[in-house]
Image (cartoon, rainbow, N blue to C red):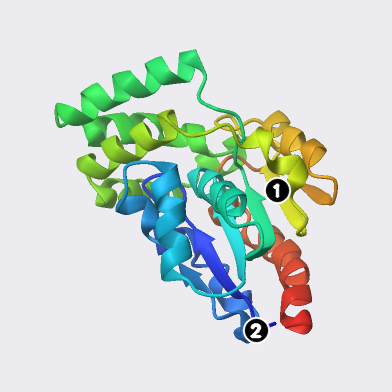
Amino acid sequence: MSSPHLVFCPGLACDERLWAAQMPIVPTRLQARVTDAHTRHARVENMADALLQEHAGPLVLCGASMGGMLAMEVARRAPERVVGLALLGTNARPETPDMFVLRTSAIDLFERGEARLVIEANAHLAFHPAQAADADLLRRYVDMVLDAGADQLIAQNRAVMQRPDARVHLPALKCPVLVMCGDGDALTPPDCSQEIASLVPQAELVTVPECGHMLTMEKPAFVNDVLRVWLQRFALES
């Protein structure tokens, strides 16, 4: 089998900056790339098709939040091509009615040109209280999200609102699956990751202490230590 490629899948309104601290620890043979399929398609299913078309051969997918939803959909559509799956702070469930209402309200504000107000007012919710006080960290996150622009915030929220229920196919996964979550994640609570791990027979669940939703930015050293070991197997097997 040819060497697999590692594809990082960013979260909603995020880009390669989300994975800046992880790129240096990826084994060279995995030829890490960051997909932007989530910026070009209206549904998670279409994003998955695009990723598969744009990245040939066997794949190791590492997705955070919305990126994890994308990674799970890729694995559903092409299980024979996905040789490893790392899911960080994500959710296999479909959208709940309450979250549908909240996202609809946010979209209304984005359409009225109030994206900065909304994002800056709520940015702290993405972080554990221990990191929420770090003004530089919050600014880097806010800048990344606002750089996506209102159109992307609207389109990506709508895609998440229409996401499929990934729980149906998770028990059929045969590849190694790493599930990571922050113990203080208020946006995607730990029980979401615990549910994913319970559905995948060979899953490894890692809880990141004193961490919120933005694992790769909040606790890069901890995340890197776990990812480095987990990714090494694919570099050795290829």
Q: Is residue 91 left or right of residue 141?
A: right
Residue depicted at x 27% and y 27%: 107
Type of the residue with mark 2: Ser
Residue type, mark 1 in image: Met
Q: Quadrant of residue 131?
A: top right
The answer to whether residue 39 is above or below residue 100 is below
Q: Residue at x 65, y 57 (%)?
A: 79
Q: Quadrant of residue 2?
A: bottom right
Q: Residues within 10 Å of mark 2 (few under 14, many from 20)?
A: few
Q: Quadrant of the N terminus?
A: bottom right
Residue 34 seen in this snapshot: yes
The answer to which of 17 and 46 lies nearer the viewer is 46
Image height check: is 200 above or below 39?
Answer: above
Q: Position of residue 167 (x, y in %)?
A: 67, 34
Is 21 displayed left or right of 116 in the figure? Answer: right
Name the outermost residue toward the right.
201
Q: Is residue 168 above or below residue 67?
A: above
Query: How packed is label 1: few (under 14 Cα within 10 Å), some, or many (20 or more)?
Result: many
First in residue order: circle 1 vs circle 2 = 2
Residue 5 placed where, x, y %? Answer: 58, 75
Left or right of 83: which side holds 237? right
In this view, 97 is above or below 214: above
Q: Secondary structure at mark 2?
A: loop
25 vs 23, left or right, is right
Q: Residue furthest left?
A: 112
Along the viewing direction, whichever of 37 and 2 lies nearer the viewer:
2
According to the picture, the residue beneath numbered tag 1 turns out to be 180
Residue indicated by mark 2: 2
Q: Secondary structure at mark 1?
A: strand
Q: Using the image as rendered, state which of residue 137 and residue 11 is in the foreground.
A: 11
Q: Is residue 136 visible?
A: no
Between marks 1 and 2, how big is the CA–CA gap?
27 Å
